[in-house]
């Protein structure tokens, strides 16, 4: 039989791929802990936790045992009119660690739908109160997903041409820092006078798809304060930053002003199955709570609050809150700091940055996001048994919390040797 990669080409269409330029895929047959195994018998350290999902390790035995027990009890049921224990338990446990003002949970299937729901909450919040507000605010270079609303508020993709004329109205401004915050506040004041601003969606502290671009918590706080004062619904997209990656449970924990809405996915279900949650405050929920049917949020997905996904999320939360996992997080944070000291002065590196277990460095040269040099770097990592996905001239690491010290050193080692080949 032909290998997976060859059979793949017959019928499969991959995400974010121009197949004519990049026809090859790699068949992965197994994953365990921080490791991926391919069909040719090679293994790779998963340096980005498979897009920031499986933070407690691939095929985590504890999570698997919980989910397989749940599988035999209740697999799937309609969540409109019915409820079930995994969802109820998850709501109780999640509220314990969410920013203190979050009260209500709305389920969907992935990060894009989580932000889509957040945007709809913001728009309908004002609609239900009889105010016409139809413009969203977003950060430059943000990424919130690939469905239409999410795509509209994302500022990153240069490949959205075919869809742009269908986008919702968005005003973008730069990620806030100590230097630009006064200009931003003045700009926002002007915008709020001229336009009907409904909501603001942002990735708190770290903009993942913008190559782990980081901004300032105090400056962000000032933005949130001003917007909330003007009743603009603030939506923290914690799809990437959530569940411990920044060192706290959520990036919003570093910011004094808490968001009205929080979007969660990716590590929510520990990499096992897809699910997302959009949470909100009582204030937002109350604008939908009415004797009028049409004021409800008429949004729903078939697999809403799937019991298996809720169970995976519950088991993941238990692990996240354990002393062992918290120790792991701090071990990785310290380890990144040590590594940074070793390499930050290299002439090949323009700058480095870290937030929690997220570590990134910008190379001192221009590399196209999907260009040849980027592919050369990627190959170097894979040939050395490390899965990292450079974004343009940025190399970043976001390992699963259970990565061993030895594995982590190997990841650093291949980054050092990559500096030699460019
Ligand atoms: C990945 C991501 C999304 C989109 O999530 P999908 O599950 O890929 O649809 C949205 N926002 C942020 C911040 C993300 O990192």
Image (tube, helix red, strand yellow):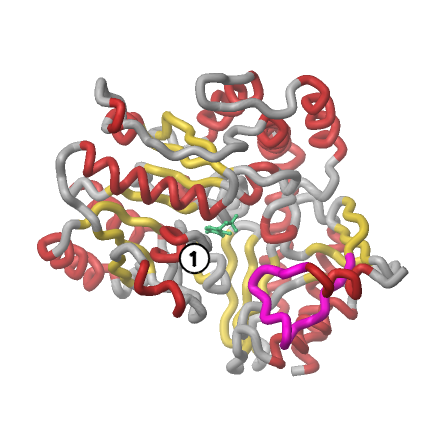
Q: Position of residue 109 (x, y in %)?
A: 51, 39
Q: State the residue at coordinates (84%, 62%).
A: 3
**Quick one: SS at disc 1?**
loop
Tell me where residue 104 sits by quadrant. Answer: top left
Closest to the observer, 374 or 83: 83
Q: Is the magenta stretch mostly helix, strand or loop?
A: loop
Mark 1 — residue?
Answer: 143
Report whether the residue tagged 1 is closer than 8 Å to ligand 1.
Answer: yes
Q: Position of residue 181 (x, y in %)?
A: 24, 60
Q: Is residue 74 left or right of residue 170?
A: right
Tell me where residue 235 sits by quadrant. Answer: top left
Q: In this view, does 149 lie to the left or right of 63?
A: left
The magenta stretch spans residue 19: yes
Does the rendering let one see residue 410? no
Q: In this view, does 270 lie to the left or right of 25?
A: left
395, above or below 259, in the image: below
Closest to the observer, 359 or 37: 37
Q: State the residue at coordinates (28%, 55%).
A: 168
Tell me where residue 207 sits by quadrant. Answer: bottom left
Q: State the residue at coordinates (33%, 49%).
A: 201
Mark 1 is surrounded, within 10 Å at the Cα level, by few (under 14), some (14 to 19) or many (20 or more) other residues, namely many
Q: Quadrant of the N terminus?
A: bottom right
Closest to the observer, 385 or 149: 149
Q: State the residue at coordinates (25%, 56%).
A: 169
Q: Which residue lies furthest to the right in this view?
A: 1
The magenta stretch spans residue 381: no
Q: Quadrant of the C terminus?
A: bottom right
Residue range of the region highlighted in magenta in the rendering: 12-27
Q: Which residue lies furthest to the left in this view?
A: 193
Q: Where is residue 145 in the image (x, y as percent from the top left)?
A: 45, 53
């Amino acid at each position: 039989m032909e290998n997976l990669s060859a059979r793949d080409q017959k019928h499969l269409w991959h995400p974010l791929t121009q197949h004519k330029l990049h026809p090859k895929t790699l068949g992965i047959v197994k994953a365990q802990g921080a490791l991926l195994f391919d069909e040719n018998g090679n293994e790779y350290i998963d340096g980005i936790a498979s897009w920031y999902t499986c933070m407690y390790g691939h095929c985590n035995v504890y999570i698997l045992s919980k989910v397989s027990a749940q599988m035999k009890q209740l697999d799937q049921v309609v969540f409109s009119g019915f409820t079930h224990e995994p969802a109820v338990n998850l709501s109780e446990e999640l509220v314990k660690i969410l920013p203190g003002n979050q009260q209500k949970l709305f389920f969907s299937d992935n990060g894009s739908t989580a932000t889509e729901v957040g945007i709809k909450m913001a728009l309908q919040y004002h609609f239900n109160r009889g105010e016409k507000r139809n413009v969203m605010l977003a950060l430059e270079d943000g990424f919130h997903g690939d469905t239409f609303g999410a795509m509209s508020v994302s500022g990153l993709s240069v490949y959205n041409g075919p869809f742009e004329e269908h986008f919702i109205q968005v005003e973008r401004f730069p990620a806030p820092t100590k230097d630009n915050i006064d200009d931003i506040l003045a700009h926002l004041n002007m915008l709020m006078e001229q336009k009907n601003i409904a909501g603001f969606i942002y990735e708190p502290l770290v903009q993942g798809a913008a190559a782990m671009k980081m901004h300032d918590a105090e400056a962000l706080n000032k933005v949130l304060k001003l917007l909330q004062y003007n009743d603009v619904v603030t939506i923290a997209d914690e799809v990437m930053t959530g569940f411990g990656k920044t060192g706290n449970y959520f990036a919003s924990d570093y910011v004094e002003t808490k968001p009205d809405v929080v979007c969660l996915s990716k590590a929510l279900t520990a990499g096992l199955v897809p699910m997302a949650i959009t949470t909100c405050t009582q204030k937002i929920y109350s604008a939908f709570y009415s004797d009028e049917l049409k004021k409800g949020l008429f949004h729903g997905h078939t697999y809403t609050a799937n019991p298996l996904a809720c169970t995976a999320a519950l088991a993941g939360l238990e692990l996240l809150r354990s002393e062992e996992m918290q120790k792991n997080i701090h071990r990785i944070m310290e380890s990144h700091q040590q590594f940074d000291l070793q390499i930050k002065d290299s002439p090949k590196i323009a700058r480095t940055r870290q937030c929690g277990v997220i570590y990134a460095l910008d190379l001192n040269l221009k590399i196209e996001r999907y260009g040849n040099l980027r592919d050369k770097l990627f190959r170097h990592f894979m040939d050395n048994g490390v899965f990292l996905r450079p974004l343009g001239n940025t190399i970043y690491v976001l390992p699963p919390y259970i990565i061993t010290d030895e594995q982590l050193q190997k990841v650093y080692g291949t980054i050092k040797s990559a500096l030699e080949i460019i």
